[in-house]
Amino acid sequence: MLAKVCSSAVNGIDAYPVEVEVNAGRGDTLIIIVGLPDAAVKESRDRVMTALINSGFRYTFGRTTINLAPADVKKEGPSFDLPIAVGMAAASEQMETDQLENFVMVGELALTGAVRPVKGVLPIALRARQDGKTGILVPAENAAEAAVVSGLRVIPIQNLREACSFLEGEVKIAPTKVNLSDLFNTNHDDDIDFAEVKGQENVKRALEIAAAGGHNVLLIGPPGTGKSMLAKRLSTILPPLTLDEALETTKIHSILGLLQPGQALITRRPFRAPHHTASDAGLLGGNISPTPGEISLAHHGVLFLDELPEFKRSVLETMRQPLEEGRVTISRAAGTMTFPSQFMLIAAMNPTPDGKTPAESRSSPREIQKYLSRVSSPLLDRIDLHIDVPPVKFREITSERTGEMSAQIRQRVMAARKRQQERFKHKPKITCNARMGTRELKSYCELDAATIELLKFAMADLNLSARAYDRILKVSRTIADLAGSERIVSDHVSEAVQYRSLDRQLWT
């Protein structure tokens, strides 16, 4: 007898349907799996057979052929265990049901028949809804993740016998449901806050501008000035994720298996801080079958690169495309994948190899120049704000006065972002000022004659590139938004220019 079971697999960050065809014939027991299965899928033969027997099914299987269609796409992972087992039970006429076409099934089987969690359930659930399926059978630990997809019955499965009984109608299982409003309204008590940072008011102001416009930031200062402390608090002043942003971010974490058991959705902006020994594949993504890297895990969040010059130059140079385009394309023999990577980059570095200021450093000018040259000018041009982080004064360290709390700063940031959303409401791909293109710069960054003259002088004096000119306009637009101004005036441009001057002072 032939049985067909609907399943799904992940390619990149999206899922595609997989039809599991099981044909049970006569003869000696022999299970053949075709359809480009990898080692984990081939090993499912022994897992599935043992799970079926331990779940009470009779050992009456003859020559069984299992086809995973489409046959020209490689199938990976243990998520096909459950649909294969259900298909074998149906093909051997040990269960009768007409519901196999209505449900998508994924799950790894233990030898006892228990269903274990798998990766990538959220994109699989989204694809099931797109294909018009009634529901999806998933491991109980993955049920909350799948339940964020509205209009789809999510059936949590504990074991193989329960799955078969549900499909036969013998057992009723209540679909898992989650309340999206409750997920987003959950009070996240941050254990870090900007109020804890002593002094550094100019740096806090720059980070507020960065958060308001989605700009990249480079912090330059000696050790102990609070660069890492400030960077880690940037995510506390960013606007909350929208539902679409949360779904896209959760998909990336889901396919890598980084969601906590029972976690439904990522509702806080991610903060990723890879070590400076990270490889190209670790940062951008890769492996034989391309998977997302750190820059994609930071999608809609913050990527913090501490000790920037200590990263391999080849690794840093590969970040140019993601910083410019908001996505990364990885080509391997197995295929080409494009992953989203719209993140805020915040990098930190010392001004000299020994960490001191250039005036105090014992390093030679040649050594300092060699150290700074590890960060190329093209990469610097893609970072909007370059900020000097000076040592904190003693009176500020011992002061009882605290700075503004993150919640207060976040309110101003959200107000500025709201103005940007209204401005770009007919351009859905542009989410903030940092994402503006050439056309938007012409439309929304008009300058009067005096401001143009000021900017012309600054460009010539600092020897800035054309890309730096665009960055200054974007930052000026954000400063104007924070001030509630529709027009960009000289004060806004002057403040934006000062965030481009530091790198020229050091690198030249």
Image: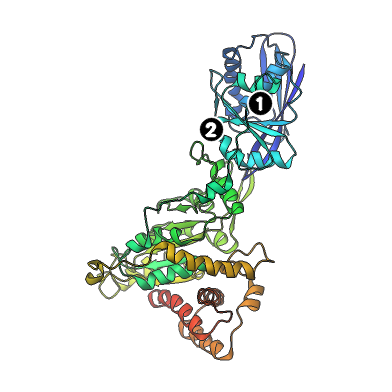
- 460 w.r.t. 420: above or below: below
| Residue 89 left/right relative to 457 | right
Classify 10 Å Cα crowding around label 2: few (below 14), some (14-19), many (20 and above): many
Helix, strand or loop at disc 2? helix
Residue corresponding to mark 2:
141
Amino acid type at circle 2 is Glu
Q: Quadrant of residue 45?
A: top right
Q: Where the C terminus falls, by quadrant? A: bottom left
Amino acid type at circle 1 is Pro
Q: Nearer the viewer, residue 441 or 426?
A: 426
Can you tell which mark lies on residue 111?
none
Residue corresponding to mark 1:
83
Q: Nearer the viewer, mark 1 or mark 2?
A: 2
Residue at image location 61% in from the left, 16% down from the top: 52
Distance, label 1 to label 2, CA atoms, is 17 Å
Instruction: State which tag comes first along the sequence, 1 or 2.
Output: 1
**Residue 229: x percent and y percent?**
35, 60
- 187 w.r.t. 345: above or below: above
**Residue 268: x percent and y percent?**
49, 52
**Residue 51: x percent and y percent?**
58, 17
| Residue 19 left/right relative to 253 | right
Helix, strand or loop at disc 1? helix
